[in-house]
């Protein structure tokens, strides 16, 4: 015979797998359904390099600190912290009531208390070459080695930097810096990706890759709501992996999904007017939130001429890269293809909404087709004559956007061929410097502009970091390192702006627009988070 609790868990499990809501005695149990259209390759936070991974990792894990909807750093596992006078030693005082989720590898199958030694292990693992974490750049140039992470006792943890780094607390809110248990990670090795154990509000239950994933409520979670009640409120999270956004949207309309992120071109006009307002057809049927989003949408151009595929690329010439920048009518692109959900990328790589963003201080490119044509003449290709065709790689989700850009470039004499690549494959190519010209986005890992400028830091070239364009400029690198020593925010922002200008002058990227998030929620939800990072925070969500 099953106990009542066993009975409802079995019923809940069957219902999750069927995509329905529990009935009978368990009808009050709540399941939050979300779709991950870009797929998911790992639940190991050391590889939290795209939005879907960040979203799911944020449910399973905690870090030292976390971020609120106003982008302020607030306590998490660390209750308090202090910084040494020279700015190089951070000392964190940890809670003593945070437990890892239950797992058979712990004594008696019960999750043990997390300690400072677990943070020392988790952070040391990020910079371990054997792990090859995509987040190694978080610490690799800031510490001398694993010895920089010190557990003074069970509840006191130190990070010892080589030199001051003022944005460190913001960096520590990134999912890469999540807390993991040594014995579980070392038992599973690379398979920890599909056997995750953390201290977060939800625990892993099931994953059939490419089809469905289930997380269940962590009944021993340590955080409380504002009234002092237990978190999370939801009983489970169910994730599907429908790659076609229009199909996924229809699932949302049928109320089989509770949340929907982003609106694809194929049905955008059905939901939003060209001015960005909800159409009469859908007004009131669900909640729509349009807000600033720390995401820069751009075209990346590989510029390192030491890489074989760059040597014969016409884009290795600065004037041609600048011509591409001038050729695109960004306001029209945003109005007609994004329904006004974005801001033209007239400044640099740092997005609107990020502290330090200033269009008066950073000068990018505005639409000027005549200037683009003149630059082609100066490069020796008047009207595009004898200019080799360039290949622009993208995914099907951005096909309409890239075909618009293709048309704009054609008008000034730059012939392009659009190459459609599956999302995971394109990300892999970009991460290996395997594609010359590509559409990409950079979503903030943490709310400091250093995160964006690190994409162009010389020491972050592949395979050591996210410098996907192979950009290298000594003056830029010197300013980047100088910023480490500046604790005053306004002074540091000025250095950031100088770096952004230097990079834009060399044009390894074409800034298309600074994004706005468009999130849809069913009307029976409350307590969800709306923040410029578009971080999915579900621990406070309630579902009627």
Image: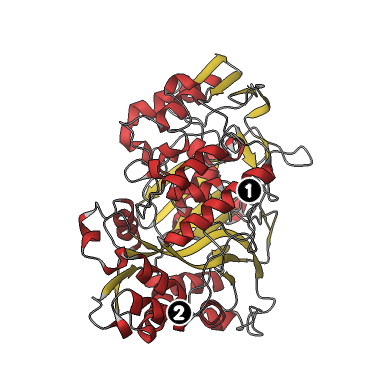
Please state the horizontal and vertical placement of residue 491, each as a whole percent of the image. Answer: 66, 44
The residue depicted at 47 percent of the width and 29 percent of the height is 123
Work out whether residue 46 can be spotted. yes
In the image, farthest residue toward the top: 153
Residues under numbered marks 1 and 2 in contact, where contact means CB atoms less than 8 Å apart? no
Work out whether residue 535 can be spotted. no
Tell me where residue 103 sits by quadrant. top left
The residue depicted at 45 percent of the width and 79 percent of the height is 371
Tell me where residue 224 sits by quadrant. top right
Is residue 275 depicted above or below 455 in this figure?
A: below
Please state the horizontal and vertical placement of residue 251, each as a whole percent of the image. Answer: 50, 70
Q: Earlier in the sequence, mark 1 or mark 2?
A: 2
Mark 1 neighbour density, 10 Å: few (under 14) some (14–19) many (20 or more): many
Is residue 437 depicted above or below 306 in this figure?
A: below
Q: Kindly identify which residue carries mark 2.
A: 371
The residue depicted at 29 percent of the width and 56 percent of the height is 429
Of 208 and 475, nearer the camera is: 475
Question: Which label was assigned to residue 506?
Answer: none
Is residue 227 depicted above or below 456 in this figure?
A: above
Please state the horizontal and vertical placement of residue 203, each as a whole percent of the image. Answer: 51, 40
Q: Secondary structure at mark 1?
A: helix
Mark 2 neighbour density, 10 Å: few (under 14) some (14–19) many (20 or more): some
Q: Kindly identify which residue carries mark 1.
A: 493
């Amino acid at each position: 015979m099953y106990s009542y609790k066993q009975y409802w868990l079995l019923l809940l499990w069957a219902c999750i797998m069927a995509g329905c809501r529990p009935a009978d005695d368990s009808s009050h149990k709540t399941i939050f359904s979300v779709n991950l259209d870009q797929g998911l390759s790992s639940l190991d936070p050391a590889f939290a390099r795209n939005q879907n991974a960040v979203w799911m990792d944020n449910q399973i894990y905690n870090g030292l600190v976390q971020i609120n909807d106003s982008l302020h750093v607030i306590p998490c596992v660390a209750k308090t912290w202090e910084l040494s006078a020279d700015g190089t030693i951070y000392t964190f005082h940890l809670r003593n009531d945070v437990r890892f989720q239950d797992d058979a590898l712990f004594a008696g199958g019960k999750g043990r208390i997390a300690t400072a030694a677990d943070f020392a292990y988790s952070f040391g693992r990020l910079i371990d070459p054997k792990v090859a974490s995509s987040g190694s750049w978080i610490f690799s140039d800031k510490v001398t080695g694993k010895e920089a992470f010190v557990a003074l006792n069970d509840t006191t943890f130190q990070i010892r930097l080589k030199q001051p780094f003022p944005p460190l607390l913001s960096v520590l809110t990134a999912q890469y810096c999540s807390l993991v248990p040594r014995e579980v990670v070392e038992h599973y090795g690379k398979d920890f990706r599909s056997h995750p154990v953390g201290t977060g509000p939800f625990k892993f239950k099931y994953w059939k890759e490419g089809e469905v994933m289930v997380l269940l409520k962590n009944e021993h979670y340590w955080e409380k709501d504002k009234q002092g009640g237990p978190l999370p409120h939801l009983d489970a999270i169910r994730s599907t992996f429908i790659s076609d956004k229009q199909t996924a949207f229809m699932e949302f309309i049928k109320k089989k999904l509770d949340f929907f992120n982003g609106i694809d071109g194929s049905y955008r006009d059905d939901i939003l007017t060209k001015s960005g307002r909800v159409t009469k057809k859908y007004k009131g049927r669900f909640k729509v939130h349009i807000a600033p989003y720390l995401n820069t949408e751009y075209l990346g151009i590989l510029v390192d001429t030491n890489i074989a595929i760059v040597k014969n690329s016409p884009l290795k010439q600065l004037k041609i890269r600048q011509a591409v920048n001038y050729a695109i009518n960004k306001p029209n692109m945003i109005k007609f293809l994004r329904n006004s959900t974005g801001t033209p990328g007239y400044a640099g790589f740092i997005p609107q909404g990020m502290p330090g963003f200033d269009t008066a201080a950073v000068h990018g490119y505005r639409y000027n087709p005549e200037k683009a044509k003149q630059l082609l003449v100066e490069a020796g290709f008047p009207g595009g004559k004898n200019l080799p065709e360039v290949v622009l790689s993208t995914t099907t989700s951005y096909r309409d956007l890239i075909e618009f850009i293709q048309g704009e470039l054609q008008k000034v004499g730059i012939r392009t061929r659009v190459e459609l690549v599956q999302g995971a494959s394109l990300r892999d190519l970009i991460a290996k410097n395997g594609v010359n010209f590509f559409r990409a986005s950079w979503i903030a890992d943490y709310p400091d502009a250093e995160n964006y400028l690190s994409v162009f830091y010389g020491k972050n070239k592949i395979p050591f970091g996210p410098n996907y364009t192979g950009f290298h400029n000594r003056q830029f690198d010197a300013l980047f390192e100088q910023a480490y020593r500046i604790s005053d925010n306004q002074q540091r922002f000025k250095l950031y702006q100088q770096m952004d200008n230097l990079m834009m002058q060399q044009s390894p990227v074409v800034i298309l627009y600074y994004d706005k998030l468009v999130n849809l929620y069913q009307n029976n939800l409350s307590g969800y988070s709306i923040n410029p990072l578009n971080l999915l925070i579900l621990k406070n969500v309630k579902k009627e």
